[in-house]
Amino acid sequence: MSVAEAQRLQGPAASPASMSAAMAAYGRAARPELERYLGAQPSAPFLDDLLAEYPSRGGKMLRPSICLATARAFGASGPQAARCAAAIEILHNGLLIHDDIQDASELRRGQPTLHALHGVPLAINAGDALMLSALRPLLDAVRPLGETAARQALDVTLAMARETAEGQALELGWRDRNVTELTEADYLRMALKKTAWLGMIWPAQLGVILGTGGREDPERVVRWGYFLGVAFQIEDDVRNLGASPGYGKELNGDLFEAKRTLMLIHVRRACSPEERARLDAFLALPRESRAPRDVLWLAGLMEGRGSIAHARAVAAAMGGAADHEFALAFGDLPPSPDLAFLRGLVRWLFERP
Amino acid sequence: MTTPEAPAGGATAGPASKASGRVQKPKVERVGPQRANGPARGSSGERTISDAVAHAVKEGYDVIAQNIHQGRLAAERFREGNYPIGAVPGDLETAALRMLNLARELSATTFDIAERLVKGIAATASTGDRTAAVPAFRQTGTPPAATGYQAAPATAPSATGYRAAPATAATASGVAAGGPSVMPLSTRFTGDGAAKAQSRTEFLKPPRTPTQPKDISATALSPRSGAGSAIAQVSFEAADIALGGLVAIVTVPGGQAAGTYTGLVFAGDDEAPLGALSIEIVA
């Protein structure tokens, strides 16, 4: 079957407006499980309030939605998928706590970060607890499906843990060791590991496992999740430089952090030797020494050298590749609202509020 | 859930073609051949966006292809069960141990994982490589692991009701403690006589092929002296990795005569026993 034929048989993608409504519905399905598992333990001082902090601030619930939609598209019914989706969101929130510490971020979802509120040691502890707490709903979700499915779930979870740690290490290592000689492929590799694996590939893989009871190879969704995740990451990076850097995020925060984005890699190659010397001097500074005027200069340089336009074009291309891979990953499934939601993710990630 | 909309995009006929009822090809933007062997250049010498995008997509596929290839290689090595644990990067090793601790929740899966891990770690132990970093499944006589993977001593029953044999007890199976191929055994006692029972076996041979706990059986545990009736209710359940490779559940009736009771343990249809399970009923 050709990709075009598969796309025709899968039916249309959901509109961006209905995507938001669908995501809210998936969130409503996952949230009770999330709250049930987080509230299962008797309240412990200096811990349980912290565990509930980030989940209570909302969030898009994108990752749980991908899991739920994939599971249902593959035929899942019952509470397992919602349980699994809750596990994904709990783990994601645990990682966010650690991310915020590593990036010295001040805001998360429009409010002070957990370590800003409670200090780094307690925040690290809460992040650890959240990540390990995620395994309980995950195991509860896959246990009834039998040995094969349970093993697959453990396999993809271990793989995700490894890939995500590698991706985070790459990004932090590049920044902290001031690595400047990076290529576009380096960036793609980092985005695959840091963003796509946890955010898209793993939720979709768990969805495949839940929906098929382990009868389908979860690797079938890897390429789709990868291109979707890379497109998502580039778009996020571009938005950070715009008027709307994202809910609760600092304008030009990525430039202050000298985050190795596609734009930074591009502009360093496209600029003049004099500009590159100034850029390298800027990158070599510690974060607190980077002046706002230099950040504005760098943002202007990226605009002037076409780096932002380049990143937008690459993001769109990655979205196109994701659409192509979608047909290959899901081509044999009958049309359904869940499938329409998954297909609509590419368009949504560019048009989301 | 979602409201499907009409498909977007695709070639459509223009107004003229609608009027004539004929489908016409759109006018082509280029009539000459595209002879771009390398990337097209703009006036400033920069690659044009379209070529840059094509390049990015190609690199995107290269990156994911490399990643999948590496993942497959790693998966094959793990699946074959011969991945030397000492060669695993440290953080993955930590993650695997954490996962193992949590995998005790998975009744059906755990036994198989435990078996594979025992093999892998035993292989590492035999090479003397990174043993200190892998405290699980240590052989008898080594200091207790700080991580709590060591079985609890028999004199201190754990809250879960599991008991392991004293570390000094020889294994009735004849498998030398400290040998390269042993499977830790924990014993749980149930029944009215459970309080007086103690395990005297801490290791068995591992099955020669992956075996579900339900396919492991034991002959009735009989007293050597002949006094007292045999204990027939012995079953096995999913391994508890925190305590050992396999858990035997022995139902001890109330009033069971004091003495040592022994039975043979078998895996599936294998004629060769994994060893002998011995328990002691104290007066």
Image: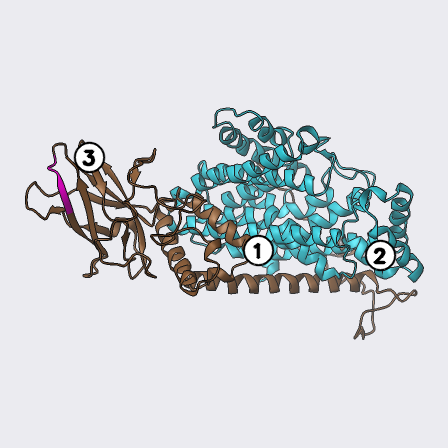
Chain colours: A cyan, B brown
Report the side of A102 relative to B279 (left or right): right
Name which residue type carries label 3: Lys
Tell me the CA gap for discs 1 and 2. 30 Å
Vertical relation: B113 (above or below) B229: below
Where residue A289 appears, as percent x and y from the top left, is: 85, 43
Determine the chain carrying the residue at label 3: B
Disc number lying in front (1 or 3): 3
Q: In the structure shown, which secondary structural element does the residue marked by tag 1 occupy?
A: helix
| Front: mark 3 or 2 | 3
Q: Is residue B244 visible?
A: yes
What residue is shown with label 2?
Answer: A267
Mark on residue B196?
3
How far separated are the C-alphas under marks 3 and 2? 77 Å
User: Which quarter of the rendering shows the C terminus of chain B?
Assistant: top left
Mark 1 or mark 2: whose residue is earlier in sequence: 1
Question: Dots 3 and 2: beta carbons under 8 Å?
Answer: no
Q: Mark 2 lies on which chain?
A: A
**Residue B173's image quarter?**
bottom left
Q: Point out the stretch of residues depicted in magenta.
A: B256-261
Q: Which residue type does callout 1 highlight?
A: Val
Q: Which mark is residue A222?
A: 1
Q: In which quarter of the image is the N terminus of chain B?
A: top right
Identify the residue at image location x=50%, y=43%: A72
